[in-house]
Image: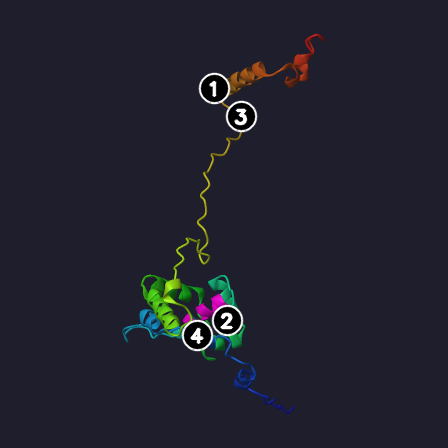
Amino acid sequence: MTIIRQGSLFDIQDLYDLEPTQRFEAVFSTIDIDPILARVTKKSLLGRPVELNYAAMIYSLVARLTERIPFIKDLVKRLKPDMIFRLDCGFLVSDSVPSEAAYSRMVTLISESNVLEKVQEMILHQAITEGFISDDTVAIDATHFEARDQAPPKEEKIKTEPKKRGRKSKAEQEQWLIQQAELEATQSIFEKKIEAQLDVTLDEL
């Protein structure tokens, strides 16, 4: 039997050329990520080589806010099947999608420094220079809000001792009888058992 290999009509690059990939260009072009890259990239040539595209990871975090993707896990789920979105964020076709742990480590490195404040000051200075905002209308919102990328701590429930099975001991039985007698003494006629109401006259009822 003759085997005929079907040739491809077009490759992935042709598909990429058919789709516009400048959706985030206006946003990415205003952000200088060099200070952030200097913080997260590996400083030494020793050890395991870095296989992560940190620039694309940073841009994907910005795109996450633009696309209103709530959590990092949702961002990873979006990156895996959506080739166009990965390319828009700066990932190469050969790049693998970073894991949630990789994003978490990078965010931790960034949060431990003041590099985001420096980038914010650079963007603010650029906006003032180009006349988008004036320096007399700048304000910083310091409202406290709960982070969404981390689940709230679980409240620990107090464990109660399970009830003992089987017959009560003699001391427990006597204590229970005393409690029942005190309870019946405080009950009204109608709250008592029917046997206790048999000797009650109609006037008392």
Give how far across and how far down residue 138 sits, in percent: 39, 63
Give the residue pinned by disc 2: 79
Q: Secondary structure at mark 3?
A: loop
The front one of 21 and 81 is 21
Q: Amino acid at mark 1?
A: Ala
Characterize the magenta stretch by its predominant secondary structure. helix
Q: Residue at x 44, y 67 (%)?
A: 99
- Of pointers 4 and 1, the one earlier in the residue sequence: 4
Q: Which stretch appears magenta?
A: 58-66
Mark 2 vs mark 3: in front: 2
Give how far across and how far down residue 42 sits, in percent: 31, 72
> In the rendered structure, are the residues bearing label 2 and label 4 in contact, judged by CB atoms less than 8 Å apart?
no
Above or below, 173 relative to 33: above
Quarter of the image for the C terminus: give it: top right
Label 2 to label 4: alpha-carbon separation:
18 Å
Q: Amino acid at mark 2?
A: Leu
Residue 71, can we see it?
yes
